Structure formats: structure tokens, C-alpha cells
């Protein structure tokens, strides 16, 4: 039920249907299904479909939407044809909306606002007209780029080429790209910042050909990489690196590693702080009563109290579970067991130190047995608090 709710929550008021977009998104998967059922599949068709899919997914994103590197003119032509082959709108149209998405993430100025549910972010914003408009973004460079203003052709092939290289590959490209806006804002973790919805996940990266490390991408959008770690799946990063190596790309932009690690550490500390706040800790020393040696001795006759490092501990409720047995505790009630606890009898573990801290009920005045002449007057003595937590 929660999944269904996530699919449809927050849909905006629909003012119309984009019939061309809807037709493309219905016809291409229908043709793909027909081909899979009735058209013989040759191995060279599979290879061609796969390679063409990879090519189409290189597209507009990192060069034109984020200017994360500089590309030579031949590489620009190669990439703009790749984007056009996916049939997802012009480079100008696509990049302009993607910049709005980054500038106005998770707001009504975000064309694929994740707050409106998975169905809207995945495909709804493509097929429905609404009163939502993309927010302002600087697109002056796109307006002044002559290549971006040129329409690119689309070529389809007959039979296997038509059904697989064309329709099936196009369907895969559409929904892979849509997953960047939907699944990558829903599935995974937020290792760099949790202010907005983008998340990192290997499955998202596989579905989107490397664009699924989306939390990193939204934090560092000008970085040519989508995956910071060497082992993370990001074929587009590898493609750009190869282009740089052979001289087709230059000025690859990367965010300083120190700042990336700083962001990751901040999130880890935040998670640890949440864990810390969920754990019960010993009573702070300033909240414990300070008592005399005489009071300690008197109360140790009615319950098992041990003095360790100046703190008085009520171990009465621990007698039955003490690994050394109850006698070792009861016969030493009212005694200073600091030396014994720290190795005189047994060098206790960190767990034992944590556990005994939860049994603190008071602080001994002076921290050791006080001489009679320095004893606190009876009128100033405080009663040792009862330990009810164990």
C-alpha cells in the first residue's frame, strides 16, 4: 500500500495530455513486445541493440546540462546525435529542464518534483500537461550554441533493426532516463547530504547506465563523474575519461576530494549522532548525589553497593547475572573495588565498563574513605539515589 501511495501522491492538476509523447511511449514498447514474440533474434542484432542503447544513453546530460567538461566539436556532434537518437526532445529542451531540476530540487519549480510521487517523476511529467512550469535557470550558453539549435535526424532499420535496435532500444532509453528522475530519488542512501531526495544505489546506476549515484551528483553537479569511488559503476565517466586521454575532451571538472570526503564524514557523524541519541547513557556526574563514607557504609548493609573510581554503584539487580557469581559482589558490598575491577581480580572489558556505568547511584565525597575530622555533618548528607534501571 505504501508503494502505491508513493506512486500517486501529490499529482498536480492535469490540464491536458501530450498525445505525441504518450503515443511514442505506448507504441515503442508495443513494437518491442511484438518483436520479442514474433521476430527472430540474431546475435548481431543483440550486439547492435546493446551498443546503440549505450550510445543513446551518453546523450546530453553531463556536457550540456552541467558543463562538467569541454568537448571537441567532433565529440559534440557524436554526443548530440546520441541524445537525439533517444527521442527525448532536443538538447535545448532537455538540458533547460534538467538545470531547473537541479536548481529547484523537490519544489514546484522542479519539472520532476519527487514530492509528487514516483509515477509523476518517472513518466507523468512527460505525458501530462499541468500548470507546473520549470523554474528559471541560466541557459544563455545553450541559446548561443549553434550546434544545440540544430535538429538531429533519427534513422530506423527494418525488421530486427526496426523492432529491436529501434523500438526496444528506444523504450529502454526512455525508461532508463526516467529512472534518473524517479528511482534515483526514491531508492538508496544519502551519503553526502539528506536535505533533498536524491539517493545513491547500485541498482539505480545499472538502470540508468551510471547515473544512479544521484546523491553525489546533486551535491557536486559540475563534477564530470557521477560515481566518486573507483569501483562504482559509471560507464559515462569512463567514456569521458577515455575521450580526455585521446584528446577529444578537456578541462574535466572535479570537486575537491577533501570537500567530498568532508560531506561524507558529516553524514556519517549525523547518523552516529542519531544512534547516540537513541542509546541510554549513565546518569551525568553532576546529577548524582555526593555522599559520605559513613552513608555509603550504612546503605551498603541493605543493598549491594560497590565503590569504583569514586563512583558508588548499586549492583543489587546484577547479582544473578554476574559472570563471577553473586558471592563475589555481596561479600564486597561497601568496599572500594577499583583495583579489583581494573585487573586486581579481573581486567574487565569495555562492555563491563559500559554496564557498570549504568549502575551509578552516587559519588563518594573525596573519592576515597574520608578521615573522621573531615566527615560531612549529618545535616548536609545526601541519600544515595535508588538504582531502578537494572
Image: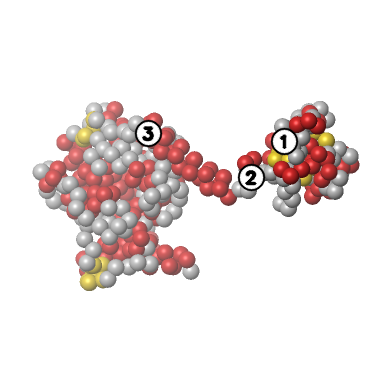
Residue shown at 26%/38% (left/top)? 68
Q: What's the mark number on residue 127?
A: none
Tell me the crowding category of disc 3: few under 14, some 14 to 19, or many 20 or more residues within 10 angstroms, Cα based.
Answer: few
Colour mapping? secondary structure
Residue shown at 33%/45% (left/top)? 218
Callout 3: SS: helix
Query: Does residue 156 appear in this view?
Result: no
Q: Which residue is mark 3?
A: 259
Tell me the crowding category of disc 1: few under 14, some 14 to 19, or many 20 or more residues within 10 angstroms, Cα based.
Answer: many
Q: Nearer the viewer, residue 252 or 77?
A: 252
212 versus 376 height, above or below: below
Callout 1: SS: loop
Which numbered disc, 2 or 1, marks the residue that appears first in the sequence? 2
Query: Does residue 229 appear in this view?
Result: yes
296 versus 124 height, above or below: above
Residue 373 placed where, x, y %? Answer: 78, 30
Structural distance between the alpha carbons of marks 2 and 1: 14 Å
Q: Which residue is mark 1?
A: 365
Which numbered disc, 3 or 2, marks the residue that appears first in the sequence? 3
229 displayed left or right of 362: left
Mark 3 or 1: in front is 1
The answer to whether the residue labelled 2 contacts the one labelled 1, judged by CB atoms less than 8 Å apart, is no
Residue shown at 41%/55% (left/top)? 186
Q: What's the mark number on residue 287?
A: 2
Structural distance between the alpha carbons of marks 3 and 2: 40 Å
Residue shown at 38%/68% (left/top)? 8
Mark 3 or 2: in front is 2
Callout 2: SS: helix
Tell me the crowding category of disc 2: few under 14, some 14 to 19, or many 20 or more residues within 10 angstroms, Cα based.
Answer: few
Q: Nearer the viewer, residue 98 or 231?
A: 98
140 versus 115 height, above or below: above
Amino acid at each position: 500500500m505504501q508503494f502505491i501511495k508513493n506512486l500517486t501522491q501529490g499529482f498536480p492538476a492535469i490540464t491536458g495530455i501530450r498525445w505525441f509523447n504518450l503515443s511514442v511511449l505506448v507504441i515503442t514498447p508495443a513494437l518491442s513486445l511484438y518483436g520479442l514474440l514474433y521476430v527472430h533474434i540474431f546475435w548481431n542484432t543483440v550486439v547492435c541493440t546493446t551498443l546503440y542503447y549505450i550510445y543513446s544513453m551518453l546523450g546530453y546530460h553531463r556536457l550540456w546540462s552541467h558543463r562538467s567538461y569541454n568537448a571537441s566539436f567532433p565529440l559534440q556532434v557524436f554526443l548530440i546525435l546520441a541524445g537525439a537518437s533517444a527521442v527525448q526532445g532536443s538538447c535545448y529542451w532537455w538540458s533547460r529542464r534538467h538545470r531547473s531540476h537541479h536548481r529547484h530540487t523537490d519544489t514546484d519549480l522542479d519539472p520532476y518534483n519527487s514530492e509528487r510521487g514516483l509515477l509523476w517523476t518517472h513518466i507523468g511529467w512527460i505525458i501530462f500537461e499541468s500548470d507546473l512550469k520549470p523554474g528559471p535557470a541560466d541557459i544563455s550558453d545553450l541559446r548561443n550554441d549553434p550546434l544545440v539549435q540544430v535538429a538531429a535526424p533519427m534513422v530506423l532499420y527494418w525488421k530486427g533493426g526496426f523492432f529491436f535496435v529501434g523500438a526496444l532500444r528506444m523504450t529502454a532509453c526512455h525508461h532508463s532516463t526516467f529512472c534518473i528522475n524517479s528511482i534515483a530519488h526514491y531508492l538508496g542512501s544519502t551519503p553526502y547530504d539528506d536535505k533533498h531526495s536524491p539517493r545513491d544505489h547500485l541498482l539505480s546506476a545499472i538502470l540508468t547506465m551510471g547515473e544512479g549515484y544521484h546523491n553525489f551528483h546533486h551535491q557536486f553537479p559540475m563534477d564530470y563523474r557521477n560515481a566518486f569511488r573507483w569501483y562504482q559503476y559509471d560507464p559515462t565517466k569512463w567514456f569521458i575519461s577515455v575521450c580526455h586521454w585521446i584528446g577529444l575532451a578537456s578541462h574535466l571538472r572535479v570537486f575537491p576530494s577533501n570537500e567530498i570526503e568532508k560531506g561524507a564524514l558529516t553524514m556519517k557523524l549525523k547518523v552516529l549522532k542519531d544512534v547516540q541519541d537513541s542509546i541510554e547513557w549513565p546518569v551525568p556526574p553532576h546529577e548524582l548525589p555526593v555522599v559520605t563514607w559513613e552513608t555509603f557504609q550504612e546503605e551498603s548493609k541493605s543493598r549491594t553497593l560497590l565503590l569504583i573510581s569514586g563512583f558508588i554503584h548499586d549492583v543489587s539487580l546484577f547479582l544473578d547475572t554476574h559472570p563471577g557469581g553473586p558471592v563475589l559482589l555481596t561479600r564486597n558490598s561497601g568496599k572500594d573495588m577499583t583495583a579489583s575491577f581494573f585487573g586486581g581480580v579481573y581486567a574487565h572489558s569495555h562492555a563491563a565498563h559500559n554496564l557498570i556505568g549504568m549502575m551509578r547511584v552516587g559519588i563518594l565525597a573525596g573519592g576515597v574513605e574520608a578521615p573522621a575530622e573531615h566527615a560531612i555533618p549529618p545535616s548536609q548528607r545526601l541519600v544515595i539515589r535508588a538504582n531502578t534501571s537494572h
